[in-house]
Image (tube, rainbow, N blue to C red):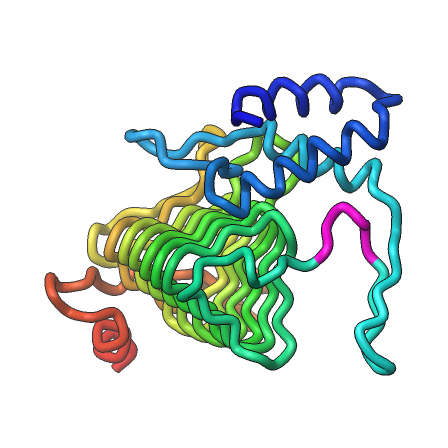
Amino acid sequence: MSPAELREALERLSAQPSSSREEALSVVDALLSALESGEVRAAEPDGTGWSVNGWVKQGILLGFRLGGSREEHLSAVFHFRDRDAFPTLDTRAMHSDVRVVPGGTTIRRGSYLAQGVVVMPPAYVNVGAWVGAGSMIDSHALVGSCAQVGAGVHLSAAVQVGGVLEPVGACPVIIEDGAFLGGGCGVYEGVRVCREAVLAPGVILTGAVALHDLVQGRVYRSEGGEPLRVPPRAVVVPGSRPGPGEYARQAGIQLQTPVIVKYRDPGTDAALTLEQALR
C-alpha cells in the first residue's frame, strides 16, 4: 500500500465511528510497517522547517481505539498487558547494524531506527518515533511517541524526549542532526532543538519556558503556534532568575530557566564545548 493509499484509508476509517475492526487494524498494521521502514514519518523536514503528517497520528490513534488488550507472559517474572495492535518491534526487522544491547530495552512497533543506531539498556522507544543514522540512545532514556531524532544525535543517560500524539496537527518534539543532550535533560512538547545544539545535564525545555540567550542578548519563546526553537550550535545550561513579586524577592526565590551561554566553535566536539561552558 502506497503512502497516498495509506493516508486515504486511514483518514476514511478514522472519520467513521463504527469502523470495521478487522479492516482498520489491517491498515494500521500497514502503517506500522511503513513507519518501521522509514517510508513514512509523523513529521519531516520540508526545506523551510518541519511539516506534520497528521494522518500518521490519526492512524496510530485508530489502532489504540480499536485494538484490544492482550497479555504477554515472557517468563515467570515478566508480564505485560497492552493493545494488541502495538507489540514490541522484532529486532530482525531492523537494519543489521542497529545495536540493541541486552538489559531491558523496549522498542515498540511503528518505530524507525536508522543504520548505526545504538540503544543502551534499559531504554524505551515509542510508536511513531524516528531515530536517524548513528545516533546513541543511552541507558534510561525515553524517545516518546512520534518524536523525531536526527542523525548523529547523542541522548545521554536518563534523557526524556517527550512524545506528542494529540492533537494530531501538533508538531512532535524534534531533535535535529548532531545535537548533544546531557544526562537527565527533559525536552517536552512544543520544543525543537536545532542541529548541533548542546544541552548541559539537567536542562528542562518545554513550550512554556523562555530561553535566554546571553550571547545575542535576546529571549526565545514559543509564539504564534511555533515551537520554542533552540538555535543551531547553541550551548544551553540550567540557569535561574528571580521570581516575580515582593514575596519572592523577600524570600529569595529563584525560578529555573535555561540559558544559552555560548555557541559551539567550528570543529569543536560537543562534549568538549559543554565541558568548557560548564567550567
Instruction: Decide: is 196 above or below 58.
Output: below
Residue at 75% x, 22% y: name it.
13
Instruction: Decide: is 259 above or below 85.
Output: below
Where in the figure is residue 147, as x and y percent of width and height? 52, 49
Give the image quarter of residue 25.
top right
Give the image quarter of residue 223.
top left
Question: Please, what is the dominant secondary structure of the magenta stretch?
Answer: loop
Q: How many marks?
A: 0
Quarter in which the N terminus is drawn: top right
Residue 188 is left or right of residue 199, and the answer is right
214 vs 170, nearest the viewer: 170
Where in the figure is residue 220, as x and y percent of width and height? 36, 45
Residue 276 is left or right of residue 190, and the answer is left
Q: Among all residues in the image, which is located at the extreme left?
A: 266
185 vs 66, nearest the viewer: 66
Q: Magenta residues, as a range? A: 82-87
Instruction: Decide: is 56 above or below 13.
Output: below
Residue at 48% x, 49% y: name it.
130
Residue 133 visible from this viewpoint: yes
251 vs 111, nearest the viewer: 111
Residue at 57% x, 74% y: name it.
140
Where in the figure is residue 70, as x and y percent of width and height? 87, 55
Residue 239 visible from this viewpoint: no
Residue at 84% x, 65% y: name it.
72
| Residue 84 inside the magenta-drawn segment | yes
